[in-house]
Amino acid sequence: MLLWLCLAPTFAQKDTVTVISFNIRYNNPGDGDNIWDNRKASCVKMAQMEKPDFLCVQEAYFVQLDYLNKSLPNYQYIGVGRDDGRQGGEHMAILYRSDRYEVVEHGDFWLSATPDVCSRGWDGACNRIVTWGYFRDKKTGKHVYCFNTHLDHVGETARRESLKLIPERIKSVVTDKKAPVFLTGDFNSDINSEIFKPLKKVMKQARKDAPVSDNRGTFNGWGNAPNNVVIDHIFYKNATPILFQTLDSDKYGRWLISDHYPIKGVFVR
């Protein structure tokens, strides 16, 4: 933190982009004290305090997105439900600061052998999806791409094939070769897994490269997981990371706002 305080004046006048990846935990009535109704106000407070340009959520049902959208008036979102391409099932939505950005183009694709239609891939237990957007900064005119996903928690082949498909799709979607590109998500995989090799050829890791960073776990299992399970990641290209944080504080009114901690990256573009 001391290094960040030293660096902050240096970057104060720079054009920065703040990205948060957050597995928000789906609206599960069986979660006891951790049900959505008990957590939702703290999730909103986290967004209000951290003020991300892009809040990329995983596992969100439409009712959760609707609540966030109504509670955060400066944000809008893109993304569809993974089960029907509309509002059905979990969304890998991207909430963006609509007071600063406008959507130029956006889309979704499924992690499967038929990515352009609603489908389940390989040995996956669930449908899995990627939501992406191409955004224009209303003030500067600069552009940025953001991709958000959640890899399967069961299928090893599904995770491996997904991390072949995603870099290929990013390459085809990204036509503005100078714009920053961010990929966020719950990858259900340690960063040292060999399945990341295709992605690491084209994108870098914010946690590894930021001069101010941490090594804390991202999955907390409602307080039952060891503090070294890192399965949520932020990747980037065409930007310079200056800060990476695992947001495991209780300052949002509740210590566990999900069974994952949000992770935050700040970048100079």
Image (cartoon, rainbow, N blue to C red):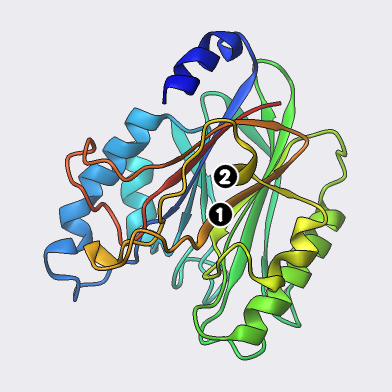
Q: Residue at x 70, y 16 (%)?
A: 140
Q: CA distance from mark 1 to mark 2?
A: 8 Å
Q: Assess disc 1: are there few (<14), some (14-19) or many (≥20) residues with their C-alpha within 10 Å of its C-alpha.
A: many
Say if residue 109 shows up in the picture: yes
The spot of residue 29 in percent (x, y) is 20, 73
What residue do we see at 71% from left, 26% from top? Answer: 269
Residue 255: image location, x then y, percent: 20, 48
Q: Position of residue 109 (x, y in %)?
A: 69, 67
Pointer 1 with pointer 2, Cβ within 8 A: yes
Residue 194 marker = none
Q: Is residue 260 left or right of residue 125?
A: left
Give the answer, above or below, for where 160 lies relative to 124. above
Q: What's the mark number on residue 233?
A: 1
Q: Earlier in the sequence, mark 1 or mark 2?
A: 2
Query: For this rendering, which residue is in front, 226 or 179?
Result: 226
Asked whether 230 or 67 is in front, the reply is: 230
Dot 2: element: helix
Q: Position of residue 234 (x, y in %)?
A: 59, 49
Q: Is 70 or 43 nearer to us in this picture?
A: 43
Q: Camera-side residue: 84 or 165? A: 165
Q: Secondary structure at mark 1?
A: strand
Choose mark 1 or mark 2, whichever is in front.
Answer: 2
Taking the spot 75% from the left edge, 50% from the top edge, the residue there is 203
The kind of residue on which mark 1 rests is: His
Q: Which mark is residue 207?
A: 2
Q: Amino acid at mark 2?
A: Arg
